[in-house]
Image (spheres, rainbow, N blue to C red):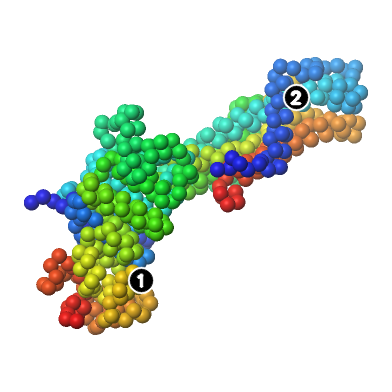
Amino acid sequence: MTAGRPPGPRLVAGLAITAVLAAVALVALAWTPEPPTRMAILFKLRPPLAHGLLGTDAFGRDVLSMLMAGARNSLGVALAAVALGGSAGTLLGVGVAARRGLVDGLVMRGCDVAFAFPPIVSAMMLGALLGPGRATATLAIALFMVPVFARVSRGAALQVWSRDYVLAARGAGRGALAISLDHVLPNIAGQLVVQATIQLGLAVLTEAGLSFLGLGAPPPEPSWGRMLADAQTYMVRAPWLAVAPGATIALAVLGFNLLGDGLRDRLDPRRSPGR
Amino acid sequence: MTAPLLEVRNLARDYGGGRGGAPRALDGVSFVLEAGTILGLVGESGSGKSTLARLVAALDRPTAGHVLLDGDDLFALPGRALVRRRRDFQMVFQDPYGALDPRQRVGRIVAEPLHLLAPRPGRAERAALVAAALEAVGLRAGDAGRFPHAFSGGQRQRIAIARALVTRPRLLVADEAVSALDLSVQAQVLNLILDLRDRDGIAVLFITHDLGVVDAVCDRVGVMYRGRIVEAGPVAAVRDRPFHPYTALLAAAEPTIPPVPRVPTSAPPLAGDAADWAGCVFRPRCPLATGRCRAEAPLPRALPAAPGRSVACHHAEAMAGPG
């Protein structure tokens, strides 16, 4: 199949960026240069390299350590949200593709409605209901992912259902569930992986937005979004406080998007030139 | 008296909305297929061949009419009973690339219909049945571990046939099963189908647009035009002396068969479409059409001179007449 083709530059770059971020998040589980929540007022607002690699914030906390611990938080929330929303949406999409008819129409119109709510808005409603926190942020992003994955998987599944091998499976007496498991899911897995990767980038961005608004993980736990929010006050005196988390968020989103694009070139038969 | 293996009675299938005069993909088709024989169905694109194949394989439901296997109406059977009967009839599709799941190994593809057997065969028995089916179509048992993309078009069609054979069905529905293959590969697959008939007594409903292929393998032939069977009979008889002007036209267009001189080969193109649906469907293209053909749709009938054949044409006697 694609075994002999060398990976494209986007795939390599995306893989490198996401691998580094994932490694940092994993390392942060066990070790950070300073404890990320320890305040040292005497050393507050030190510029990069004057105290620690990336300086300190208004409470004298080490910015690099906070970023590392924030990676754990951001990537963890994004991964959990995409896994949760992705499986629920895929289940829905593959299910309605197998049934069609009225259920299909209702679910798809429901997805249209769900798309009308930006994730920030639904997170604020959820936050009001459940109280802000990491679980609320995860749930809000996951809810936003459900219609996205439902649509993608439904479209891909309908294509599979139109193939002769599905007809042959029906001729072999297989039911809709067996066909969905044995034929549809394996054949749309590539497209779903691509979609999940791209949505991871979006989830990181959304999580940062929610933390920025105070709807993410509560303080003192470090998160990229709240670091950005806290930095606003010191934008002139200590611009590195905003640049560090901002650049990190941008890098993470870029990495996931590059990885998704690169994977699409390899896995998605519709986009790959001359299979 | 025993029922024939397959009997199709007055089968009709409409597609699309019920607007007045909407063309039927299939209209009042009846025929009988005896065990151990091959019935060819020929016709041009849109004549309803594939619709008929799907109905006979119970992959679609008819608007009206019946498909009887051993005298049992497939569409009157309860769902579970129909699934159990599926082991007796299996289908082979036109496109050998679309008919095999690219993510499954050949062994799993061929084993899929084994779900229909009761009791379900065990692992070892499944492997043995798959190996036997692969060898029956001229592949190696070891091919079971490979993926479809490792095979050529002709080999893939053999895999599809192996899948259809694995439950030892009595009826094979082959929808344009050789049309996508090269001529030399076609010959191999056709020989395989003949072997299946002679060795295992399998009956085949062989659907194609290629009269030459029908000539090579079929015992009887039905000629379809716009959802109807306009002529049916033993292959040699129909080929040598068509009673229906459409059959003659089809034969004349076929390079491997000597044209029949009496009918002009340049018939007017398919015209009128759904507009004039009354009367004979072939009238717009027919060189023999008269006022009666406009007023009255011809029904299939036997000619006294030719037992075992049927033709749906008011002027069949003119075609059959001396000369």
- The part of the image, by quadrant, that contains residue B116 is top left
Residue carrying label 1? B255
Under tag 1, what secondary structure? loop
Separation (CA) of disc 1 from disc 2: 76 Å
Name the amino acid type tagged 1: Pro
Residue A174 in view, yes or no: no
Q: Is residue A16 left or right of residue A3?
A: right
Q: Is residue A177 left or right of residue A260?
A: left
How busy is the neighbourhood of tag 1: few (under 14 within 10 Å), some, or many (20 plus)? Answer: few
Q: Is residue A266 left or right of residue A160?
A: right
The residue depicted at 74 percent of the width and 17 percent of the height is: A31
The residue depicted at 34 percent of the width and 50 percent of the height is: B92
The residue depicted at 35 percent of the width and 56 percent of the height is: B187
Residues flagged by tags 1 and 2 on a common chain: no
- The part of the image, by quadrant, that contains residue B12 is bottom left
Name the amino acid type tagged 2: Met
The residue depicted at 16 percent of the width and 81 percent of the height is: B322
Residue carrying label 2? A68
Chain label for disc 1: B
What's the mark number on residue B166? none
Percent of width and height locating residue B49: 32, 60
Q: Residue furthest toward the bottom?
A: B291
Percent of width and height locating residue B15: 35, 60
Asked whether A85 or B145 is in front, the reply is B145
Asked whether A225 or A22 is in front, the reply is A22
How busy is the neighbourhood of tag 2: few (under 14 within 10 Å), some, or many (20 plus)? Answer: many
